[in-house]
Image (cartoon, helix red, strand yellow):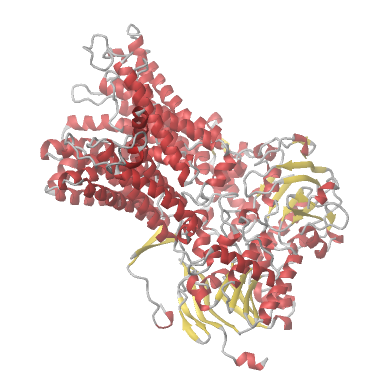
Amino acid sequence: MDIAQNILLTIMTAATPLLIAAIGELVVERSGVLNLGVEGMMVIGAVCGFAATILTGSPWIGMLAAVAAGAVFSLLFGVLTLSLAANQVATGLSLTLLGLGLSGMIGESFVGTAGIKLASVNIPGLTEIPLIGRLVFGQDPIFYISLILTGGVAWFLFRTRAGLTLRAIGDNHASAHALGINVLKIRYLAVIFGGACAGLAGAHLSLVYTPQWVENMTAGRGWIALALVVFASWRPWRVLGGAYLFGAVSIGQLHAQALGFGIPSQFLSALPYVATIVVLVIISRDRRLTLMNTPASLGQPFVPDR
Amino acid sequence: MHIELQKRPVPSRLFAVLSPFIALGLTLIAGAIMFMALGKNPFDALYSFFIEPLTEVWSIHELTVKAAPLILIAVGLSVCYRSNNWNIGAEGQFIMGGILGSLVPIMLPGFQTWLTLPLMLLLGMAGGAAWGAIPAFLKTRFNTNEILTSLMLVYTAQLFLDWLARGVLRDPNGNNFPGSVRFPAAAQLPEIMPSQGSAHYGIVLALIAAVIVWFMLSFTLNGFQVRVLGANPRAGRFAGFSQTRMTYLAFLISGGLAGLAGISEVSGAIGQLRETISPGYGFTAIIVAFLGRLSPLGAIAAGFMLALTYLGGEAAQMTLGISDKVGRVFQGLLLFFVLGCDTLINYQVRLVLRKAAPAAGGQS
Amino acid sequence: MQDQQTETPLLETRGLTKIFGSLRACDGIDLAIAPGEIHALLGENGAGKSTLVKMLFGVLDPSAGEILWKGKAVRIGSPGEARATGVGMVFQHFSLFEALTVAENIALALDGNVAIDRISEEARRLSLEYGLPLDPSAHVADLSVGERQRIEIVRSLLQNPELIILDEPTSVLTPQEADKLFETLAKLKAEGRSVLYISHRLEEVQRICDRATVLRHGKVTGACDPRQETPSSLARMMVGGEVAEISGAGLGEPGEVLVDVRKLSAPARTPFAVALRDVELTVRAGEVIAIAGVAGNGQSELFDVLSGEVTVSDADSLRIADVAAGRLGITERRLMGCSFVPEERHGHAAVPNMNLSGNLVLSRYASDRKAFLTGGWLDLINLGPVAAATKRISAAMDVRKSLEDPPAGSLSGGNLQKFIVGRELDRQPRVLVVNQPTWGVDAGAASRIRQALVDLAKSGSAVIVISQDLDEVFEIASSISVINEGQLSKPEPASSMTRERIGLLMGGFHDGTPLGNSAPEASHAH
């Protein structure tokens, strides 16, 4: 029975970075901005989190550094797409390319360095409860943050006035501007939040999932997070479901590799990517539904005239 | 402090020409600052990065070897991006082109005639085009976002190549090292001046492709369609142009050219099919396309520029001990500045330090 | 009356100016609105009315000049500040959010943190009080244009403003809906509030407004009591000179049937589109059929289906010159002699960043293949003949431009529209379908375009004009039909049609006869 708990634990651990990055991107896209730089911000978060941990000896400081690095890095995207109205698709791509390059440079001296893992929660008496103890009371801190983030974002978007304003901007930025809402300011905040989340997701990779630095260690997770937002039709709790589904797929293929089955490991490794494509096809097939769910001003630059 | 944009009634021709150069200048300044932060003399560093590779014949040859795939891919991407099809999976199409073309010398080692190479190149194009057709099909048939699908297909292609090079296509006499047999001479893209350096005919293919695609974009109805559908899909529909056809056309052209680049690289620069055949050309070419202002002729100049960052990275590592990853950083920075500077073409940009308080009666 | 003139105005502007690049959209505007009056701001499209009110509402910053509120100079830096001052605004192109509910839309315009359910209650109460019924939990996407306007009005009333600005409010209303709006305005006036009423419709300004300020090319050209003026004197102030009369007379006997629409239906393609239901329409050579209607009732959907941008499954439901054409694309229909002018100039009828010559090729590469393309299968664009045709069209339609072949986006609305219409007329089409031919076009260009449409019909072509502008409809049509929620009324001769009847048809009313030629049940569906 402990095997079941272990498998569930690994699935949740694999899903957590996807969930955090996707929740961040969801807020960004709800405000009408498409930031394709998640992969880049995530890898920057991973390397900065790892470096800060090694330099200070504290993975907590590392985690904060990753959040800060992701946020600062996203600001580059913000300046270009918001203040300079640059093409969001191209700018997001360039953020990813720059992030991959920059992280390689920063991380070069850390390759092969043993990392420090962010310790999991351990509450004597509770964590040892059979079957569910470690699932509920024994996971890493970032896992709990990811759940708080999901619930928090859901509450923020649909229960607060600020969330209403954010959704309104994503729906129609010209109307929002005419009502006196500062479109660019709120979009900046959303973009920075998305960057911070991606940074945190990166920290989870280099401080929890595999506590070490390997170049390009995000391995496309940022892109899968982007796909998750579409999959979830821009709804926070569905992102959670999607992330765990993908966690299950990637853990499943790892177990399959361990067991052999005679299937080449490369084919199994490709499974999450193929699954992403399949899921995207299924979800976007209905053109009308996609149109209904997508924030109407997504990806369109906004230039206020004054 | 904030930035104010004022839309120009007509895009500025001046800045359309100047913007790539301003971006280059800003990249150099940012690079100098970065080198200083790394504790190097910025002038020495920039010299060894951008000038030194151009001072020797063999390294100019190297430059064309690196520029050839970049130009080939970027020319295809120009068509894609201009028509609003966001193919970012050229890396995967490059790999599939390399794989399919390589099948000729690997599977038919005895087939060594003058036909071998053309057949390989054609198969390379077909492989890239076929891989590019997948996101096109998914986009037109199922409305699926081509950015995400084309990218996912990169990872898939990389893993597929890894499997082939370590498995079924591995050289049986290769001491278990990954990689296929070395190609016979008839299956290798010849070098242009073998006595001087390694430049192969891939660069010639790239230049020809650039000119053909430039001609197509500038003077033919197909090129006109690309421009119209890219600028205003609705106007394109009014003209009677088919968005579906254009998506296929763009993906087939860019996939085909990426595949051609892939097989040229394998048969020209490497000489066998390995488990990795690209140092990220498919992604760097995105930068080339934008730096070249999405014009095939611009892609030629931009391709050489980006090829320089590969060589410069190696040179800087050797002479100054700077990480060769700096080259990647330069590439990313360059694209950032290019996109930022492009704003100057369509907008007048003003930096407002503080919201101007209305002076008496708001007279200004 | 004398007292009111000397009283401090509620709002006053002195020398208010707004410059965009080289364009002076507003140039030294002086305006004074007294408390409790309905003040008209009259002017053609592009006269600077919208720019002026955006400055008054804090959306735009004035380049020069000042705004006085109750005699004191104020700076209105944002719509929030405008609302705090006491100015409410009802936008022409509504500032509503389709994906949100009515209550959420209202909440967004209110300052401070008010619970959504309290807003719902308040909105319901106010909307009933002013005779503007609203359901706070409805999604805006599901509402009609008239209902959307109610949201805008209730939204501005919730803040208890002293001045309410309405920008072209009746352009989206049926005459009957407009009457109800006027009652609401009268009520507001009775409460001592002021109204700034922006319009280019002389008749309604004369009916409801106490004073009027007239704008032309960004300048004030007159301030008057509209009731003391005649429509033609007001028009002169607005347009600056007499506008040529269109000679619709002389349309001969209609000839053969060129367009025959039978039971044409098309489902809505997006959640925000209108479905077409059982459209019936017959257009003969030499006829101008006008299709009137309030915006958003299926005009653009009808245009798309007539042009072939959207095809219908039943090929026989649309016959052109006796050929089943329902499934033919726009290119094939052009090859049959049809031409099309869509409503939106930028990005639909023309590519703004492309030169005029490129925009000529856009709609004519197929029909004028021999002239405009060369090089065999290469399909090279033949620049010489294209340039010559561009020149010919510009001359024929008097297109004013600063360069030989400028980007379409750099032309003014009127000049670009003249080019677009001229582009189609240049090939003498047998059938012309045009949607809102003079929307946002200055009076001179508008009359030229209308004359050209009539002339085309006189020469034996069939012309279908979809238009919201009733003046235009009466000026050029030989028969008139009305579109309402995707259904078309039976065309009636223009000579026997009245504005009142059009108004009833626009609202979906019909005296006993069902709308369109559809089965009687269809009428009960509403």
Spot occupied by residue C264 in the image (x, y as percentages of width and height): 76, 42
**Residue sitting at the far front:** A125
Spot occupied by residue B40 in the image (x, y as percentages of width and height): 12, 47
Residue shown at 34% from the left, 43% from the top: A143
Left or right of residue C1: residue C116: left
Q: Can I make out residue C247 in this image? A: no
Q: Is residue A240 above or below residue B114?
A: below
Left or right of residue A301: residue C325: right
C440, C451: nearer the viewer: C440
Q: Is residue B243 above or below residue A2?
A: below
Residue shown at 36% from the left, 53% from the top: A193
B220, B116: nearer the viewer: B116
Identify the image quadrant of residue C292: bottom right
A38, B274: nearer the viewer: A38
What count of labels does the image hold?
0
Identify the image quadrant of residue B112: top left
Left or right of residue C351: residue A253: left
**Residue sitting at the far top:** B110
